[in-house]
């Protein structure tokens, strides 16, 4: 009798832990900050999936179109863009969009500070950078920033 009661309590406790850690978990979404030579770069969130909340991927085109209309932040060849995440992602992917093509940008993890940094190329003109951070559990955020290389 005591053994069956203990097994029953253990089963209830296990179910509570599973539900608490998955469904009821209110894990905070990561915050991000983009910096270029002590200036904060404004960004837009193109799409995301965090826990049970998900933004439809079809809005990526709308967000991309909206950021094209915004004023770009001035930058120079070789400048570094620093990305500060409040919660360290497992993977970061950075893509540069120009008027005619898109290309992957080298990204680098600086272990000392937990920041990502990428350098701006030599081609002049407006560029949109797509930064996708991926965390555990298929959680991700895709951010868009716009720069004008002078």
Image (cartoon, rainbow, N blue to C red):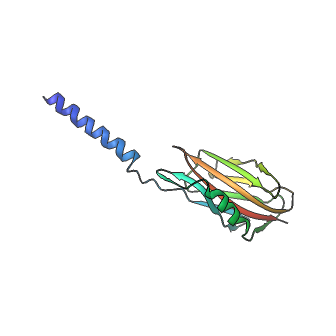
Residue 68 point in image, percent of width and height: 73, 65
Q: Quadrant of residue 58?
A: bottom right
Front residue of 43/53: it is 53
Residue 36 point in image, percent of width and height: 72, 64
Front residue of 126/101: it is 101
For the C terminus, the image quarter is bottom right
Q: Quadrant of residue 129?
A: bottom right
In the image, taking residue 89 as reference, residue 12 lies left or right, namely left
Q: Is residue 110 visible?
A: no
Residue under the point 71% across and 47% down? 108
Q: Count numbered badges in the picture.
A: 0
Residue under the point 74% across and 59% down? 128
In this view, the residue farthest toward the bottom is 71
Q: Is residue 23 visible?
A: yes
Residue 32 point in image, percent of width and height: 60, 59
In the image, taking residue 59 as reference, residue 147 lies left or right, namely right
For the N terminus, the image quarter is top left
Residue under the point 27% across and 35% down? 11
Residue 104 point in image, percent of width and height: 76, 47
Residue under the point 59% across and 47% down? 134
């Amino acid at each position: 009798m005591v053994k069956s009661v203990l097994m029953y309590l253990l089963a209830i406790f296990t179910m509570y832990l599973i539900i608490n850690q998955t469904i009821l978990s209110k894990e905070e979404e990561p915050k991000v900050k983009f910096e270029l030579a002590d200036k904060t770069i404004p960004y837009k969130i193109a799409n995301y999936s965090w826990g049970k909340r998900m933004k439809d991927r079809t809005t990526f085109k709308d967000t991309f179109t909206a950021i094209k209309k915004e004023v770009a932040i001035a930058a120079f060849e070789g400048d570094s863009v620093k990305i500060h995440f409040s919660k360290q992602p497992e993977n970061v992917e950075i893509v540069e969009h120009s008027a005619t093509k898109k290309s992957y940008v080298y990204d680098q993890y600086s272990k000392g500070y937990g920041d990502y940094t990428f350098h701006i190329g030599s081609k002049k003109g407006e560029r949109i950078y797509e930064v996708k951070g991926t965390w555990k559990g298929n959680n991700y955020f895709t951010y868009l920033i716009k720069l004008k290389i002078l």
